[in-house]
Amino acid sequence: MVLIKKIPEREDGKLLIIGTTSKNYVLKDLEIVTLFDITLNVPLLGIEEIKAVLLSYNCEEILAQEISEFIKSIAIKQLLLIIDMAI
């Protein structure tokens, strides 16, 4: 938390910090949420979004449809991890 609060040495220097978690309450308990200017809640992907992600990785249309209907909903981070393991 000390490093997050540290002001950049250069006046024109900018720092982008992106944090992801499935346990938002932990960040709230540690009072880390207040250090970020923006908080976004990303919903789980549905069947069509899963299919679109799979197709973007050159998955066959029929296979992408079957996989997306089987999974039904999943977090984007988890889906990308699964795809990376499969490639």
Image: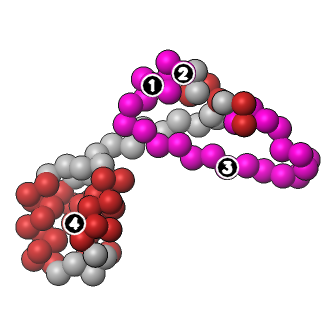
Residues rendered magenta in the picture: 4-30
Residue neighbourhood size for the residue with mark 4, other residues' Cα within 10 Å, grouped as few (<14), some (14–19), many (≥20): many
Q: Which residue position is annotated with label 4? A: 51
Percent x, y for residue 69?
Answer: 9, 59
Q: Quadrant of the C terminus?
A: bottom left
Label 2 and label 3: CA atoms lie apart by 20 Å
Label 1 and label 2: CA atoms lie apart by 6 Å
Q: Which residue position is annotated with label 2? A: 30
Q: Which residue position is annotated with label 1? A: 26
- Cβ atoms at labels 2 and 3 below 8 Å apart: no
| Label 4 residue SS | helix
| Label 3 residue SS | loop
Label 4 and label 2: CA atoms lie apart by 37 Å
The main secondary structure of the magenta stretch is loop
- Cβ atoms at labels 3 and 1 below 8 Å apart: no
- The amino acid at mark 3 is Leu
Query: Which callout, 4 or 1, points at the residue further toward the start of the chain?
Result: 1
Percent x, y for residue 41?
Answer: 42, 38
The quadrant where residue 82 appears:
bottom left
Closer to the eye: label 4 or 1:
1
- The amino acid at mark 4 is Lys
